[in-house]
Image (cartoon, coloured by chain):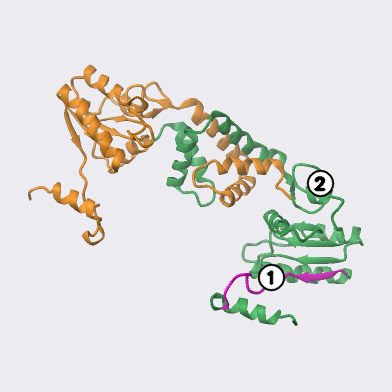
Chain colours: A green, B orange
Amino acid sequence: MQYPAPIAKLIDSFMKLPGVGEKTATRYAFYVLQMEDQDVSAFSKNLLEVKRKLHHCPNCGNLTDMDLCSICRDKSRDPSTIIVVEDVRDVMSMEKMQEYHGLYHVLNGVLSPSAGTAIEDINLMSLLERLQKHPEIKEVIIATNANVEGETTAMYIARLLKPIGVKVTRIACGLSVGSDIEYADEMTLFKAIEGRTEL
Amino acid sequence: MQYPAPIAKLIDSFMKLPGVGEKTATRYAFYVLQMEDQDVSAFSKNLLEVKRKLHHCPNCGNLTDMDLCSICRDKSRDPSTIIVVEDVRDVMSMEKMQEYHGLYHVLNGVLSPSAGTAIEDINLMSLLERLQKHPEIKEVIIATNANVEGETTAMYIARLLKPIGVKVTRIACGLSVGSDIEYADEMTLFKAIEGRTEL
Protein backbone atom coordinates (compact mmCIF):
# COMPACT_ATOMS: atom_id res chain seq x y z
CA MET A 1 0.00 0.00 0.00
CA GLN A 2 1.09 3.53 -0.70
CA TYR A 3 -0.38 6.71 0.73
CA PRO A 4 -3.03 8.32 -1.51
CA ALA A 5 -1.42 10.60 -4.14
CA PRO A 6 -2.20 13.97 -2.48
CA ILE A 7 -0.49 13.06 0.79
CA ALA A 8 2.41 11.26 -0.94
CA LYS A 9 3.06 14.40 -3.00
CA LEU A 10 2.97 16.63 0.08
CA ILE A 11 5.42 14.29 1.86
CA ASP A 12 7.74 14.65 -1.17
CA SER A 13 7.50 18.42 -0.96
CA PHE A 14 8.34 18.47 2.75
CA MET A 15 11.28 16.13 2.10
CA LYS A 16 12.85 18.83 -0.08
CA LEU A 17 13.40 20.96 3.07
CA PRO A 18 16.86 20.76 4.68
CA GLY A 19 17.24 18.02 7.29
CA VAL A 20 13.74 16.64 6.73
CA GLY A 21 13.61 12.89 6.09
CA GLU A 22 10.65 10.66 5.28
CA LYS A 23 9.51 10.25 8.91
CA THR A 24 9.49 13.97 9.68
CA ALA A 25 7.90 14.82 6.32
CA THR A 26 5.12 12.28 6.99
CA ARG A 27 4.57 13.79 10.42
CA TYR A 28 4.31 17.29 8.93
CA ALA A 29 1.98 16.14 6.13
CA PHE A 30 -0.42 14.42 8.52
CA TYR A 31 -0.34 17.46 10.75
CA VAL A 32 -1.36 19.64 7.78
CA LEU A 33 -4.40 17.36 7.33
CA GLN A 34 -5.74 18.43 10.71
CA MET A 35 -4.74 22.09 10.47
CA GLU A 36 -7.41 24.79 9.99
CA ASP A 37 -8.32 25.38 6.34
CA GLN A 38 -7.39 29.04 6.55
CA ASP A 39 -3.93 28.28 7.99
CA VAL A 40 -3.21 25.84 5.16
CA SER A 41 -4.40 28.37 2.54
CA ALA A 42 -2.17 31.02 4.11
CA PHE A 43 0.78 28.58 4.19
CA SER A 44 0.25 27.80 0.51
CA LYS A 45 0.00 31.50 -0.41
CA ASN A 46 3.04 32.46 1.71
CA LEU A 47 5.18 29.91 -0.13
CA LEU A 48 4.35 31.49 -3.47
CA GLU A 49 4.67 35.07 -2.27
CA VAL A 50 8.11 34.60 -0.77
CA LYS A 51 9.36 33.68 -4.25
CA ARG A 52 7.29 36.32 -6.07
CA LYS A 53 7.71 39.39 -3.88
CA LEU A 54 11.20 39.19 -2.41
CA HIS A 55 14.36 40.38 -4.12
CA HIS A 56 17.77 41.67 -3.06
CA CYS A 57 18.11 45.35 -2.19
CA PRO A 58 20.05 46.90 -5.15
CA ASN A 59 22.06 49.01 -2.71
CA CYS A 60 23.21 46.51 -0.05
CA GLY A 61 22.04 43.02 -1.08
CA ASN A 62 19.69 42.55 1.89
CA LEU A 63 16.27 40.96 1.25
CA THR A 64 13.32 43.24 0.65
CA ASP A 65 9.86 43.43 -0.87
CA MET A 66 10.28 47.19 -1.58
CA ASP A 67 12.63 49.21 -3.82
CA LEU A 68 15.26 49.46 -1.11
CA CYS A 69 15.52 47.39 2.09
CA SER A 70 14.23 48.75 5.41
CA ILE A 71 17.76 49.60 6.59
CA CYS A 72 18.82 51.48 3.44
CA ARG A 73 15.48 53.39 3.54
CA ASP A 74 16.02 54.42 7.17
CA LYS A 75 17.43 57.98 7.03
CA SER A 76 18.22 57.96 10.77
CA ARG A 77 20.99 55.39 10.35
CA ASP A 78 24.66 56.40 10.37
CA PRO A 79 25.91 56.30 6.75
CA SER A 80 29.59 56.41 7.73
CA THR A 81 29.94 52.71 8.66
CA ILE A 82 29.16 49.53 6.75
CA ILE A 83 29.20 46.02 8.20
CA VAL A 84 29.88 43.36 5.55
CA VAL A 85 28.12 40.04 6.24
CA GLU A 86 27.79 36.78 4.32
CA ASP A 87 24.06 36.25 4.66
CA VAL A 88 20.76 38.08 5.15
CA ARG A 89 20.28 36.23 8.45
CA ASP A 90 23.55 37.72 9.73
CA VAL A 91 22.00 41.19 9.38
CA MET A 92 19.22 40.03 11.69
CA SER A 93 21.78 38.73 14.23
CA MET A 94 23.63 42.06 14.19
CA GLU A 95 20.38 44.00 14.59
CA LYS A 96 19.44 41.94 17.65
CA MET A 97 22.52 43.45 19.34
CA GLN A 98 20.72 46.86 19.19
CA GLU A 99 24.11 48.62 19.44
CA TYR A 100 24.94 49.20 15.79
CA HIS A 101 23.20 51.94 13.84
CA GLY A 102 25.20 52.03 10.61
CA LEU A 103 24.51 50.30 7.29
CA TYR A 104 25.20 46.80 5.93
CA HIS A 105 26.46 45.10 2.82
CA VAL A 106 25.29 41.52 2.29
CA LEU A 107 27.61 39.37 0.14
CA ASN A 108 25.01 36.62 -0.27
CA GLY A 109 27.84 34.12 -0.38
CA VAL A 110 31.48 33.69 0.48
CA LEU A 111 34.66 33.13 -1.54
CA SER A 112 35.36 29.40 -1.60
CA PRO A 113 37.82 27.93 -4.10
CA SER A 114 36.78 24.42 -3.03
CA ALA A 115 33.07 25.11 -3.77
CA GLY A 116 34.04 27.05 -6.91
CA THR A 117 32.63 30.38 -5.69
CA ALA A 118 34.49 33.24 -7.32
CA ILE A 119 34.35 37.03 -6.88
CA GLU A 120 31.63 37.48 -9.50
CA ASP A 121 29.37 34.98 -7.67
CA ILE A 122 29.09 37.17 -4.57
CA ASN A 123 27.74 40.69 -4.14
CA LEU A 124 31.19 42.29 -3.75
CA MET A 125 31.81 44.60 -6.71
CA SER A 126 28.76 46.65 -5.74
CA LEU A 127 30.49 47.39 -2.40
CA LEU A 128 33.37 48.95 -4.31
CA GLU A 129 30.92 51.06 -6.34
CA ARG A 130 29.12 52.05 -3.14
CA LEU A 131 32.38 53.27 -1.60
CA GLN A 132 33.29 55.25 -4.69
CA LYS A 133 29.80 56.83 -4.87
CA HIS A 134 29.54 57.61 -1.15
CA PRO A 135 32.67 59.29 0.24
CA GLU A 136 30.84 59.65 3.59
CA ILE A 137 31.60 55.96 4.27
CA LYS A 138 34.57 56.02 6.66
CA GLU A 139 34.81 52.44 7.94
CA VAL A 140 34.02 48.98 6.58
CA ILE A 141 33.72 46.30 9.31
CA ILE A 142 34.13 42.82 7.88
CA ALA A 143 31.88 40.38 9.77
CA THR A 144 32.19 37.21 7.68
CA ASN A 145 32.14 33.92 9.60
CA ALA A 146 35.20 32.87 11.62
CA ASN A 147 36.01 29.88 9.39
CA VAL A 148 38.40 29.32 6.48
CA GLU A 149 36.06 30.72 3.79
CA GLY A 150 35.06 33.67 5.98
CA GLU A 151 38.70 34.58 6.76
CA THR A 152 39.75 34.23 3.10
CA THR A 153 36.90 36.49 2.02
CA ALA A 154 37.77 39.03 4.74
CA MET A 155 41.41 39.15 3.60
CA TYR A 156 40.37 39.54 -0.02
CA ILE A 157 37.93 42.38 0.73
CA ALA A 158 40.54 44.14 2.89
CA ARG A 159 43.08 44.08 0.04
CA LEU A 160 40.44 45.24 -2.45
CA LEU A 161 39.30 48.20 -0.33
CA LYS A 162 42.58 49.44 1.16
CA PRO A 163 43.64 51.37 -2.04
CA ILE A 164 40.43 53.48 -1.80
CA GLY A 165 41.67 54.80 1.54
CA VAL A 166 38.71 53.59 3.63
CA LYS A 167 39.34 52.10 7.10
CA VAL A 168 38.83 48.33 6.94
CA THR A 169 38.41 46.37 10.20
CA ARG A 170 37.66 42.77 11.15
CA ILE A 171 35.47 41.73 14.10
CA ALA A 172 37.35 40.10 17.00
CA CYS A 173 37.78 36.38 17.61
CA GLY A 174 37.92 35.20 21.22
CA LEU A 175 35.98 33.55 24.02
CA SER A 176 32.18 33.54 23.83
CA VAL A 177 30.73 35.60 26.69
CA GLY A 178 29.83 33.26 29.56
CA SER A 179 32.12 30.45 28.38
CA ASP A 180 34.89 28.68 30.30
CA ILE A 181 38.53 28.73 29.20
CA GLU A 182 38.63 25.00 30.02
CA TYR A 183 36.27 24.23 27.16
CA ALA A 184 37.64 26.68 24.57
CA ASP A 185 39.51 25.15 21.62
CA GLU A 186 43.16 26.09 21.11
CA MET A 187 42.57 28.23 18.00
CA THR A 188 40.01 30.37 19.83
CA LEU A 189 42.33 30.74 22.82
CA PHE A 190 45.20 31.72 20.53
CA LYS A 191 43.00 34.37 18.86
CA ALA A 192 41.82 35.60 22.26
CA ILE A 193 45.40 36.10 23.46
CA GLU A 194 46.51 37.61 20.17
CA GLY A 195 43.63 40.10 20.33
CA ARG A 196 44.14 41.01 24.00
CA THR A 197 43.48 44.63 25.03
CA GLU A 198 45.07 46.70 27.79
CA LEU A 199 43.02 47.13 30.97
CA MET B 1 14.84 45.29 11.92
CA GLN B 2 12.33 42.63 11.07
CA TYR B 3 12.36 40.31 8.11
CA PRO B 4 10.34 41.60 5.13
CA ALA B 5 6.65 40.63 5.45
CA PRO B 6 6.63 37.75 2.91
CA ILE B 7 9.41 35.84 4.68
CA ALA B 8 8.09 36.65 8.17
CA LYS B 9 4.71 35.23 7.17
CA LEU B 10 6.27 32.06 5.75
CA ILE B 11 8.28 31.62 8.97
CA ASP B 12 4.99 31.89 10.90
CA SER B 13 3.42 29.22 8.70
CA PHE B 14 6.34 26.82 9.19
CA MET B 15 6.18 27.42 12.95
CA LYS B 16 2.67 25.93 12.96
CA LEU B 17 4.19 22.51 12.15
CA PRO B 18 4.81 20.18 15.11
CA GLY B 19 8.23 20.53 16.73
CA VAL B 20 9.26 23.47 14.54
CA GLY B 21 10.53 26.51 16.44
CA GLU B 22 11.61 29.89 15.14
CA LYS B 23 15.17 28.81 14.21
CA THR B 24 14.06 25.79 12.19
CA ALA B 25 11.20 27.73 10.57
CA THR B 26 13.65 30.47 9.52
CA ARG B 27 15.98 27.84 8.08
CA TYR B 28 13.12 26.30 6.09
CA ALA B 29 11.85 29.69 4.87
CA PHE B 30 15.28 30.76 3.62
CA TYR B 31 15.71 27.40 1.96
CA VAL B 32 12.42 27.91 0.11
CA LEU B 33 13.86 31.18 -1.25
CA GLN B 34 16.54 29.27 -3.13
CA MET B 35 14.36 26.35 -4.20
CA GLU B 36 13.34 25.97 -7.87
CA ASP B 37 10.19 27.92 -8.77
CA GLN B 38 8.41 24.79 -9.92
CA ASP B 39 9.14 22.93 -6.66
CA VAL B 40 7.71 25.80 -4.62
CA SER B 41 4.60 25.98 -6.83
CA ALA B 42 4.13 22.23 -6.43
CA PHE B 43 4.63 22.51 -2.64
CA SER B 44 2.01 25.27 -2.48
CA LYS B 45 -0.46 23.27 -4.60
CA ASN B 46 0.15 20.04 -2.65
CA LEU B 47 -0.73 21.79 0.61
CA LEU B 48 -4.10 22.84 -0.76
CA GLU B 49 -4.85 19.52 -2.44
CA VAL B 50 -4.19 17.43 0.64
CA LYS B 51 -7.01 19.33 2.35
CA ARG B 52 -9.28 19.40 -0.69
CA LYS B 53 -8.97 15.88 -2.10
CA LEU B 54 -8.47 13.58 0.87
CA HIS B 55 -11.25 12.12 3.00
CA HIS B 56 -11.81 9.02 5.13
CA CYS B 57 -12.87 5.80 3.40
CA PRO B 58 -16.58 5.35 4.35
CA ASN B 59 -16.00 1.61 4.81
CA CYS B 60 -12.85 1.43 6.96
CA GLY B 61 -11.82 5.01 7.90
CA ASN B 62 -8.49 4.89 6.03
CA LEU B 63 -7.45 7.98 4.04
CA THR B 64 -8.30 8.10 0.35
CA ASP B 65 -8.82 10.42 -2.59
CA MET B 66 -11.26 7.92 -4.21
CA ASP B 67 -14.71 6.54 -3.22
CA LEU B 68 -13.15 3.69 -1.26
CA CYS B 69 -9.54 3.36 -0.09
CA SER B 70 -7.04 1.27 -2.07
CA ILE B 71 -7.31 -1.64 0.38
CA CYS B 72 -11.12 -1.81 0.42
CA ARG B 73 -11.09 -1.61 -3.41
CA ASP B 74 -8.61 -4.52 -3.71
CA LYS B 75 -10.73 -7.63 -4.42
CA SER B 76 -7.72 -9.94 -3.92
CA ARG B 77 -7.58 -9.23 -0.18
CA ASP B 78 -8.94 -11.71 2.35
CA PRO B 79 -12.30 -10.34 3.63
CA SER B 80 -12.41 -12.70 6.63
CA THR B 81 -9.98 -10.73 8.86
CA ILE B 82 -9.95 -7.12 10.02
CA ILE B 83 -7.08 -5.42 11.86
CA VAL B 84 -8.28 -2.48 13.99
CA VAL B 85 -5.71 0.35 14.24
CA GLU B 86 -5.73 3.82 15.82
CA ASP B 87 -4.28 5.79 12.95
CA VAL B 88 -3.90 5.82 9.17
CA ARG B 89 -0.12 5.61 9.58
CA ASP B 90 -0.52 2.34 11.47
CA VAL B 91 -2.05 0.82 8.32
CA MET B 92 1.14 1.74 6.48
CA SER B 93 3.28 0.10 9.20
CA MET B 94 1.22 -3.11 9.00
CA GLU B 95 1.44 -3.14 5.19
CA LYS B 96 5.26 -2.83 5.35
CA MET B 97 5.24 -6.25 7.04
CA GLN B 98 3.97 -7.73 3.73
CA GLU B 99 2.52 -10.70 5.62
CA TYR B 100 -1.06 -9.59 6.18
CA HIS B 101 -3.56 -9.71 3.33
CA GLY B 102 -6.84 -9.00 5.14
CA LEU B 103 -8.69 -5.71 5.65
CA TYR B 104 -8.40 -2.87 8.18
CA HIS B 105 -10.56 -0.64 10.31
CA VAL B 106 -9.05 2.73 11.28
CA LEU B 107 -10.44 4.26 14.49
CA ASN B 108 -8.86 7.68 13.80
CA GLY B 109 -8.47 8.13 17.53
CA VAL B 110 -8.46 6.24 20.79
CA LEU B 111 -10.68 6.17 23.87
CA SER B 112 -9.17 8.49 26.45
CA PRO B 113 -11.20 9.67 29.43
CA SER B 114 -8.40 12.08 30.38
CA ALA B 115 -8.43 13.75 26.93
CA GLY B 116 -12.23 13.57 26.85
CA THR B 117 -12.42 11.26 23.83
CA ALA B 118 -15.60 9.20 23.95
CA ILE B 119 -16.97 6.38 21.79
CA GLU B 120 -18.75 8.74 19.39
CA ASP B 121 -15.47 10.60 18.71
CA ILE B 122 -13.78 7.58 17.16
CA ASN B 123 -14.72 5.51 14.11
CA LEU B 124 -15.99 2.53 16.15
CA MET B 125 -19.74 2.16 15.56
CA SER B 126 -19.11 1.66 11.82
CA LEU B 127 -17.05 -1.44 12.74
CA LEU B 128 -20.12 -2.92 14.42
CA GLU B 129 -22.22 -2.18 11.32
CA ARG B 130 -19.51 -3.68 9.12
CA LEU B 131 -19.55 -6.92 11.14
CA GLN B 132 -23.35 -7.14 11.00
CA LYS B 133 -23.38 -6.50 7.23
CA HIS B 134 -20.50 -8.88 6.38
CA PRO B 135 -20.88 -12.28 8.06
CA GLU B 136 -17.74 -13.40 6.14
CA ILE B 137 -15.64 -11.53 8.75
CA LYS B 138 -14.36 -14.26 11.09
CA GLU B 139 -11.67 -12.49 13.14
CA VAL B 140 -11.03 -8.96 14.40
CA ILE B 141 -7.38 -8.37 15.44
CA ILE B 142 -7.07 -5.34 17.73
CA ALA B 143 -3.77 -3.53 17.06
CA THR B 144 -4.16 -0.36 19.12
CA ASN B 145 -0.98 0.97 20.76
CA ALA B 146 0.48 -0.82 23.80
CA ASN B 147 -0.22 2.06 26.20
CA VAL B 148 -3.02 2.86 28.65
CA GLU B 149 -5.38 4.39 26.07
CA GLY B 150 -4.65 1.65 23.53
CA GLU B 151 -5.30 -1.12 26.06
CA THR B 152 -8.52 0.52 27.32
CA THR B 153 -9.79 0.86 23.76
CA ALA B 154 -8.86 -2.76 23.00
CA MET B 155 -10.79 -4.01 26.06
CA TYR B 156 -13.81 -1.89 25.15
CA ILE B 157 -13.87 -3.11 21.55
CA ALA B 158 -13.51 -6.73 22.68
CA ARG B 159 -16.54 -6.43 25.00
CA LEU B 160 -18.54 -4.68 22.28
CA LEU B 161 -17.84 -7.31 19.61
CA LYS B 162 -17.94 -10.56 21.63
CA PRO B 163 -21.81 -10.75 21.66
CA ILE B 164 -21.82 -10.82 17.83
CA GLY B 165 -19.91 -14.09 17.97
CA VAL B 166 -16.84 -12.93 16.03
CA LYS B 167 -13.35 -14.00 17.19
CA VAL B 168 -11.60 -10.99 18.79
CA THR B 169 -7.81 -11.12 19.31
CA ARG B 170 -5.15 -8.72 20.56
CA ILE B 171 -1.62 -8.48 19.13
CA ALA B 172 1.14 -9.78 21.43
CA CYS B 173 3.28 -7.70 23.78
CA GLY B 174 6.87 -8.86 24.37
CA LEU B 175 10.50 -8.25 23.47
CA SER B 176 11.29 -6.33 20.28
CA VAL B 177 13.11 -8.56 17.81
CA GLY B 178 16.87 -7.98 18.18
CA SER B 179 16.59 -6.50 21.66
CA ASP B 180 18.37 -7.60 24.87
CA ILE B 181 16.49 -8.80 27.96
CA GLU B 182 18.89 -6.65 30.01
CA TYR B 183 17.41 -3.48 28.57
CA ALA B 184 13.73 -4.51 28.53
CA ASP B 185 11.47 -2.76 31.05
CA GLU B 186 9.70 -4.91 33.65
CA MET B 187 6.20 -4.51 32.16
CA THR B 188 7.41 -5.72 28.76
CA LEU B 189 9.20 -8.68 30.38
CA PHE B 190 6.07 -9.53 32.36
CA LYS B 191 3.98 -9.46 29.17
CA ALA B 192 6.60 -11.55 27.35
CA ILE B 193 6.48 -14.25 30.04
CA GLU B 194 2.70 -14.11 30.31
CA GLY B 195 2.41 -14.57 26.53
CA ARG B 196 4.98 -17.41 26.31
CA THR B 197 4.37 -20.17 23.75
CA GLU B 198 5.37 -23.86 23.83
CA LEU B 199 8.38 -24.86 21.73
Q: Main secondary structure of the magenta part?
A: loop
Q: Horizontally, is A92 left or right of B130 in the view?
A: right
The residue located at (19%, 48%) in the rendering is B191
- How many marks on residues? 2
Residues under numbered marks 2 and 1 in contact, where contact means CB atoms less than 8 Å apart = no
- From the image, tell me which residue sits under label 1: A151
Q: Residues within 10 Å of mark 1 (few under 14, many from 20)?
A: some
- Identify the mark nearer the N-term, 2 or 1: 2
- From the image, tell me which residue sits under label 2: A68
Asked if the stretch drawn in magenta spans residue A167, the answer is: yes
Q: Horizontally, is A126 left or right of B74 in the view?
A: right
The residue located at (59%, 49%) in the rendering is B22
> Which chain is mark 2 on?
A
Return the x and y of residue A177 as percentages of the image width and height.
63, 70
Q: Horizontally, is B62 left or right of B33 in the view?
A: left
Q: Horizontally, is A16 left or right of B29 in the view?
A: left
Return the x and y of residue B87 as percentages of the image width and height.
35, 35
